[in-house]
Image (tube, grey):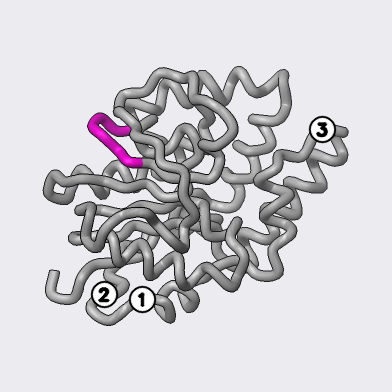
């Protein structure tokens, strides 16, 4: 497990623990996803399931479904909660709004969406690209995809896509720009990587210190609720 993943999922685990118990869908999760950090069954979707198998143990149970984000193979209101983290910046701009509407279509109680936002995220990713290149390391595929996007998703895209009956209720900052840069870079330096793995194991139970989320943020998590909740 990576510390970067823990920083991404921990705020959503805390939110779900505050809500009433219910079924959960994690869209665009990759192989690790929400089930790596929270007990219980999670239905996870991604295109990657067509090519490989997960190996790592996890506290939850995952049901893997290969699917695109803009056309989920589930009925209306099939899940209590729909989650998507760090997926929208990988989608072509033309299908982002349709994917937001799909999350709302299959959810009953809440939609939790998080992604790198705007210029701060762009600066972090370009800085990581330069530092990894300077170290002559291999740039991760996800970073290459980030940098290929014409524009990162933002709050305006999300609110514009919300269907009738849904509203943006809350925004949570996640991962300040300094910690995000430092953690991702450390995870790609063999001599330092062991330290980030040790911190991930330590903080998995205690929680990532709140200072990592203060200040200018790389990612925002949006809580979307049905009107009247």
From this viewpoint, is residue 100 visible? Answer: yes
Spatial CA span between label 2 and label 3 = 44 Å
Q: Which element type, helix, strand or loop, lies under badge 3? A: loop
The residue depicted at 33 percent of the width and 28 percent of the height is 206
Residue designated by label 3: 137
The residue depicted at 58 percent of the width and 60 percent of the height is 91
Spatial CA span between label 3 and label 1 = 40 Å
Return the disc, 2 or 3, that comes first in the chain's sequence: 3
In the drawing, does residue 83 fall left or right of residue 95?
Answer: left
Residue 58 image point, x, y percent: 37, 23
Secondary structure mostly seen in the magenta stretch: strand
Q: Which element type, helix, strand or loop, lies under badge 2? A: strand
State the residue in front, 168 or 215. Answer: 168
From this viewpoint, is residue 217 visible? Answer: no
The answer to which image quadrant residue 188 occupies is top right
Range of magenta residues: 38-43
Residue designated by label 2: 166
The residue depicted at 52 percent of the width and 25 percent of the height is 53
In the drawing, does residue 106 fall left or right of residue 29?
Answer: left
Pointer 2 local density, CA inside 10 Å: few below 14, some 14–19, many at least 20:
some
Residue designated by label 1: 162
Residue 229 image point, x, y percent: 13, 69
Residue 49 image point, x, y percent: 51, 36
The answer to which image quadrant residue 171 occupies is bottom left
User: How many numbered marks does the figure carry?
Assistant: 3
């Amino acid at each position: 497990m990576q510390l970067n993943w823990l920083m991404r999922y921990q705020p959503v685990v805390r939110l779900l623990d505050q809500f009433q118990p219910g079924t959960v869908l994690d869209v665009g999760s990759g192989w690790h996803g929400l089930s790596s950090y929270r007990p219980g069954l999670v239905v996870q979707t991604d295109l990657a399931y067509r090519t490989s198998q997960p190996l790592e143990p996890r506290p939850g149970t995952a049901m893997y479904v290969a699917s695109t984000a803009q056309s989920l193979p589930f009925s209306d209101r099939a899940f209590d909660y729909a989650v998507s983290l760090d997926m929208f910046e990988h989608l072509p701009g033309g299908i982002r709004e349709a994917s937001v509407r799909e999350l709302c279509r299959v959810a009953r109680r809440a939609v939790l969406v998080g992604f790198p936002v705007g210029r701060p995220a762009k600066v972090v990713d370009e800085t990581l690209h330069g530092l990894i290149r300077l170290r002559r390391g291999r740039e991760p595929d996800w970073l290459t995809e980030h940098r290929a996007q014409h524009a990162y998703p933002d709050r305006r895209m999300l609110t514009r896509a919300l269907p009738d009956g849904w509203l943006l209720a809350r925004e949570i900052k996640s991962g300040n720009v300094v910690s995000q840069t430092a953690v991702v870079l450390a995870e790609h330096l063999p001599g330092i990587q062991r330290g980030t793995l040790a911190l991930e194991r330590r903080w998995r139970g205690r929680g990532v210190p709140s200072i990592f989320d203060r200040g200018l943020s790389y990612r925002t998590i949006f809580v979307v609720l049905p009107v009247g909740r």
